[in-house]
Image (cartoon, grey):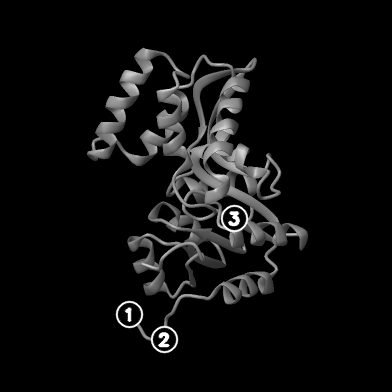
Amino acid sequence: MNPEIRSLSKSEFLESVVRLRPSLAVFDCDGTLWSGDAGEGFFDWELRRGLVSDEIVRWARARYADYREGKVSEDDMCAEMVTLHRGLRNSDVQQAAERYFEENFPSLIFPELQHLVRQLRELGSDVWLVSSTNDWVIRAATKHFGVPEDHILAAAVEIENGIVTDRLVRVPSGEGKPRAIHEVIQRIPDAAFGNSRWDQEMLELAKYPFAVNPTAELKTTALERRWPIYWPDSVEPR
């Protein structure tokens, strides 16, 4: 490692972001705003509770096993974690997602990131949450960060007469993140925050990228490109 490159302390990280006063700031969610993968967790949680039919449960389990073996792409798996709800009432899925998030994730939120998002909002920044996790779960998370529900770009399908369809709207993963930002927000982010290779394209798009709690792969990229790195207090630097 280049000795001139080091991770930021909490105060350095928060102060450096606030000093930028970004007009537009975009945040990945899983691994960046909280520890763990809420999308993957909700997928397992709902299958165990029978939110979908037994037939879909059997298909989904086999499909996820194929994904873990590299036989199904990240984009396809993220999409299918949303489309498997086709035919269900949107309000029922949203209620389930809210229950899941409240039962499992408030204690996993990184407090300093929660504080940062709220502070940026108070300073007038336009803050968006961008995630490949389904939009029901991300919508459930918004109240913990003070972000409006219409400021999320997550994996989503069309809703028709209150019923979930299998017609995809978007899957913001990898290249899909900057694509969604261009299509919906139509501005270049001043600051972007992410933790994995699936955030790299979004970080590259921003004027000021920040690697937060980075995976080994993103850490290597961040070091090469001299992006600031921040490890949340509750995480052991890797």
Residue 153: % across, % down = 58, 42
Crowding at dot 3, Cα within 10 Å, few <14 / some 14-19 / many 20+, comes out as: many
Which residue reaches farthest bottom? 4
Residue toward you, 116 or 27: 116
User: Which residue lies at the image location 49% right of the left edge and 72% below the top edge?
Assistant: 228
Residue 140 quadrant: top right
Specify the amino acid type for callout 3.
Answer: Val
In depth, the one of 48 and 132 nearer the eye is 48
* Residue 160 on image: x %, y %: 61, 17
Neighbour class for label 1 at 10 Å: few (<14), some, many (≥20)?
Answer: few
| Residue displayed at 25% across by 32% down | 66
Residue identified by numbered label 1: 1
* Labelled disc at residue 26: 3
Q: At label 1, which amino acid type do we have?
A: Met
Secondary structure at badge 3 equals strand
* Disc 2 target residue: 4
Q: Mark 2 near mark 1, Cβ–Cβ under 8 Å? A: no
In this view of the protein, can residue 188 be seen by the observer? no
Horizontal placement of 80 versus 155: left or right? left
CA distance for labels 3 and 1: 28 Å
As shown in the figure, which amino acid type bears the numbered disc 2? Glu
The first of marks 3 and 2 along the sequence is 2
Q: Is residue 150 visible?
A: yes
Q: Secondary structure at mark 2?
A: loop
| Separation of residues labelled 2 and 1 (CA atoms) | 8 Å
**Quadrant placement of the C terminus:** bottom left
Give me the residue at 57% from left, 40% from top: 138
- Closer to the chain start, of discs 3 and 1, is 1
